[in-house]
Image: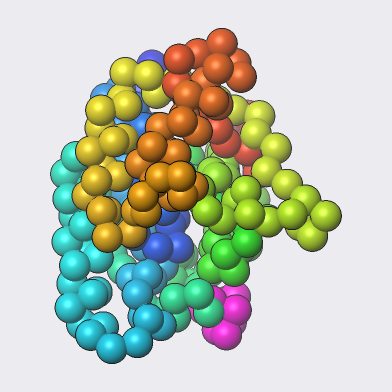
């Protein structure tokens, strides 16, 4: 993790809770080291779920706010792309929404979803990030990383899409309490164990990723692009 000048970190999440499931501990660590972390949600995560939408959207936004307070990140906004139906809108429109916050954040590092997730919104989010942050002259972003999300990344068979092959592991052992508390902020989205999207499963996954590289707990990432200047 950066120990030099503070960095601007942008997280592009398809739905509120993805930022916690994918990298809650890493966000806390960035903030602890003085980095500024901003999150853009591409949807409210409830738009296609039927009746009572306004109340559901309000509760989901409240949960995101609680998570932001626990982890210390800024919420840039909530786009309104259709939940679980990003493939019904143009990739350009999603990329333009992301481009709309580029100048506001001027990110050094961008995190987003794995392009081979089962959830179609995650796949589109990844493609849109790569589109919005094309490696053109003057682009400030030097690194793009993808994260895994329980109940999406591991549910896509590797025979169907590219598997998640992490090459970067962030030690989050000191930030497990914040990760767990942020998960509880999204209690309506979490499921009881042994569901893979349970708090217990998230903590076990962090332990597993950590043990694979000799740490007590870690979150894993796959580098999509890195430019060393």
Magenta span covers which residues? 86-93
Q: Position of residue 43 (x, y in %)?
A: 38, 71
Please determine whether, in this image, residue 52 is positioned above or below residue 58.
Answer: below
* Residue at point 35%, 87% (across, down): 50
- Which of these two is toward me, 137 or 151? 151
* Residue at point 45%, 15% (across, down): 216
Which colour assignment does the render follow?
rainbow
Q: Position of residue 36 (x, y in %)?
A: 29, 38
Quadrant (top left, top right, bottom left, bottom right) of the C terminus? top right
| Residue at the top extreme, as displayed | 214
Q: Position of residue 22 (x, y in %)?
A: 46, 44
Queried whether the magenta region covers residue 143, the answer comes back as no
Please determine whether, in this image, residue 161 is positioned above or below residue 148.
Answer: below
| Residue at the bottom extreme, as displayed | 51
Q: Secondary structure of the magenta portion, mostly?
A: helix
- Which of these two is toward me, 78 or 85? 85
| Residue at the right extreme, as displayed | 159
Q: Is residue 19 visible?
A: no
Image quadrant assignment for residue 44: bottom left
Please determine whether, in this image, residue 167 is positioned above or below residue 88.
Answer: above
Image quadrant assignment for residue 203: top left
Please determine whether, in this image, residue 59 is positioned above or below residue 163.
Answer: below
Q: Position of residue 226 (x, y in %)?
A: 63, 36
In this rendering, would 127 be left or right of 40? right
* Residue at point 35%, 75% (across, down): 46
In this rendering, would 140 be left or right of 159? left
Q: Is residue 63 visible?
A: yes
- Which of these two is toward me, 201 or 113? 201
* Residue at point 55%, 84% (across, down): 89
């Amino acid at each position: 993790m950066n120990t030099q000048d503070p960095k601007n970190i942008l997280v592009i999440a398809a739905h509120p809770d993805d930022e916690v499931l994918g990298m809650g501990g890493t966000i806390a660590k960035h903030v602890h080291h003085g980095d500024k972390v901003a999150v853009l949600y591409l949807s409210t995560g409830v738009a296609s779920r039927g009746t009572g939408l306004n109340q559901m959207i309000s509760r989901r936004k409240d949960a995101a706010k609680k998570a932001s307070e626990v982890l210390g990140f800024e919420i840039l906004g909530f786009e309104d792309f259709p939940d679980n139906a990003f493939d019904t809108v143009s990739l350009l429109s999603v990329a333009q929404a992301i481009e709309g916050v580029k100048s506001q954040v001027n990110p050094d590092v961008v995190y987003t979803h794995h392009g081979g997730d089962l959830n179609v919104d995650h796949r589109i989010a990844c493609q849109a990030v790569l589109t919005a942050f094309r490696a053109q002259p003057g682009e400030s972003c030097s690194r793009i990383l993808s994260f895994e999300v329980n109940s999406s990344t591991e549910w896509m068979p590797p025979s169907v899409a590219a598997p998640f092959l992490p090459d970067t592991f962030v030690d989050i052992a000191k930030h497990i309490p914040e990760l767990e508390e942020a998960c509880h902020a999204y209690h309506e989205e979490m499921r009881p164990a042994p569901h893979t999207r349970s708090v217990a499963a998230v903590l076990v996954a962090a332990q597993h990723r950590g043990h694979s590289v000799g740490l007590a707990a870690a979150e894993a990432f796959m580098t999509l692009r890195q430019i060393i200047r």
